[in-house]
Image (spheres, coloured by chain):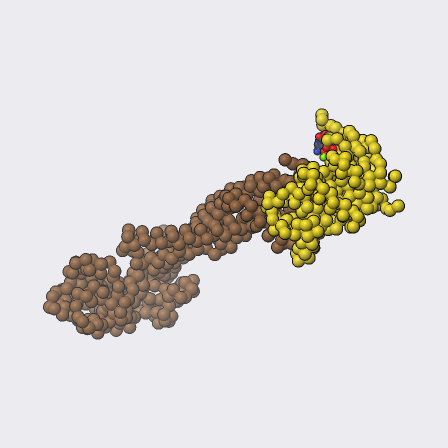
Amino acid sequence: MTFFECIKMAFSSMRMNKMRSFLTMLGIIIGISSVITISSIGSTIKKTVSNSMFGFGMATIDLSVIERDYTSSTPVKITENDMITYEMLEGLLEEYPGDYELVASDYLDTCETINSKNEAIVLDVMGIQPGYMNYTMKKMVKGRNITARDVKETKHTAVVSEVFELQYGNDESIIGKTISLNGTYNFEVTVVGVYSDKKTLQKYNLGEKNISTTILTPYSLVGKLKGNQKTKFGYVELQPNPEVDPGILVIQAQQYFDRLYERNENWEINVFDCGEATKSLTVVIDILAIAFSLIAAISLIVGGVGVMNIMLVSVVERTSEIGIRKALGAKTKSIKRQFVTESVIICLIGGTIGIIFGLISTYALGFIAKYMLNTLAADVAESITLEPTPSLLAIIISVICSVLIGVIFGSSPAKRAAKMNPIDALRFE
Amino acid sequence: MSESIIRIDNVVKTFNIGMENELEILHKICIDIKEGEFVAIVGSSGAGKSTLMNIIGLLDKPTAGRYTLNGIDTSNMKDDELSEIRNSQIGFVFQTFNLIPRMTALKNVELPMMYKGIPQKERTAKAKKLLEMVGMDDRMSHQPNQLSGGQKQRVSIARAMANDPAIILADEPTGALDTVTGRMIMDIFHKLNKENGKTIVLITHSRELAQETDRIITISDGKIISDKGGYEI
Ligand SMILES: Nc1ncnc2c1ncn2[C@@H]1O[C@H](COP(=O)(O)OP(=O)(O)O)[C@@H](O)[C@H]1O
Ligand SMILES: [Mg+2]
């Protein structure tokens, strides 16, 4: 009896009892689909979390001045000379161009400006470093960001919000326009870019026309205006280039500062990768997903026992058929193969349907989660990318599991059928 | 005189050995059947005819004694060896037909050939020819429950002939049929015996049908009480 004949025979005997075959599959369907759904929820959460963590600036590389011998009993007082200077940071950025961005920001004041219709608009002025945009997850919609050069040369450039662009009310593009800001400080800036700000835009569109938004200018410009240009730091956050391995970025920075602090007896710089912490969180999510999938896998065992139960019933029910087959010359092997094939096919079909249901429910849950996120937490929804991510590994494992369940739980009933004495089987009523 | 094909030597069959209801059904039976014989076994119900037939058909093993088939002692054969011999050398016809339900007549006839490992094309052709021989070529794709008793029995004769066995064992093949269809079945057996040279062992209740054969063996209470006709005459 060939393999193909076994399969044909299995299908014909499944057709004989469609309802029962389906009910047998149901256990497997439920088991597999819950494993797929749960593992997919796990990988979706993991991806969403790591996306938003990196986006929220959790993946910064932090520099801090620390005492070399922090166990010493006589504390050393930190002096101005031990602090990180602005020049040191510029040196790092120049030595490794594109690898790091500064994220510092400095609030100046509230200013007023006049729009094209001669109306006063209130703005909050903030001095920023280029990395500030990524750090706060602000996206540019037009023009360009504040660059390192803007900061270095203390340029009078500015990035404004979408709302301000509307408030300004010019038919032409706001980019390139020079606006004068008045208040405690009086100065002019040229708009080079517009950033998106959905939340205030929503409020604006709902009629809150006088809402005030933030105008972003080079960090150094605010320092110059305040007259207290901040140049010494005890703690600095850097935005790493996401394309580069953060491990390398940490080592580079550490080596750079070790060189600079070589002759400092008491203090050194500690470089810390915050993204590493994010990674360990995703590991925790992984472990949880695996644990829950295993719990779901228990239902697979229950499904397997169901298959075994039905196969046993089927063997008893088909005793006389087995007797006839044996009388006609079927060997132990052929009978065994027939019943194992049948249970494997039931499990495989159940497994396939389970995978399909699992995928459907993964995407359905993703859709519901997205909807809830948008309605319940609209302000953060923009910054979270929730993409249902079915776990391919779980699908592959499910297929293998289905086959294994079929073999494991089908072989004992099959053995029972194969061992039957032909005459006892024929006499069975 | 031709070769002895079935040789039953002091065969005893006891059921439920070691239990309270232990019962010896066949007592030291001796039978010798030559190739090409048409033998009828008669006897009252419960005499042990089917038990004997099951031993001849290698479906059951004797408790004691020796059974030699085609000159080969079958006592120490393994189950799979017995399956192989049943498959290629013995054709069974049962009173209750024993066709596999929900499988077409054609597929039922193909079954012994499938277990022998004959390729699909070849066995379909052979099965069609056999069904034609028993006059069932117009009902090949019918399932057993769509056939009458006589038709079912004809299908099962075709199935018994599938691997061209030397021996046909028929346990009351006409028992569930009316006289007319029973007659038709008997004619097929005669034809198989005369034209194809098959050795046929037929269990029957009917004295009349038994008279048509070469030899009549009468069994009563697990013993042979008469064995006449055939080559002895
Ligand atoms: N497997 C068995 N276990 C116990 N008793 C059996 C078994 N098979 C047959 N018998 C008994 O053997 C006797 C002969 O049965 P059987 O050979 O079927 O008779 P028949 O001549 O009517 O075909 C009966 O009394 C029957 O009950
Ligand atoms: Mg009987």
Q: Position of residue B92 (x, y in %)?
A: 72, 43
Residue at point 19% right, 66% down? A166
Residue with the most extreme top position: B20
Q: Is residue A66 left or right of residue A180?
A: right
Q: Can you say whether B205 is above or below A149 in the image? A: above
Please tell me which residue lies in front, A148 or A270: A148
Q: Position of residue B196 (x, y in %)?
A: 78, 50
Q: Which colour denotes chain B?
A: yellow
Residue with the most extreme left position: A118
How many numbered discs? Answer: 0
Quarter assignment of residue A415: top right
Q: Position of residue A116 (x, y in %)?
A: 13, 70
Please tell me which residue lies in front, A110 or B60: B60
Please tell me which residue lies in front, A336 or B46: B46
Ligand 2 found in image quarter: top right
Q: Can you say whether B108 is above or below A113 in the image? A: above
Residue at point 87% right, 41% down? B231
Please tell me which residue lies in front, A348 or B185: B185
Q: Position of residue A308 (x, y in %)?
A: 56, 42
Quadrant in which the C terminus of chain B is drawn: top right
Residue at point 77% right, 32% down? B43
Residue with the most extreme front position: B180
Q: Can you say whether A240 is above or below B172 in the image? A: below
Report if residue A278 is visible in the image: no
Residue at point 46% right, 55% down? A391
Quadrant in which the N terminus of chain B is drawn: top right
Q: Which colour denotes chain A?
A: brown
Report if residue A174 is visible in the image: yes
Q: Is residue B146 left or right of residue A146?
A: right
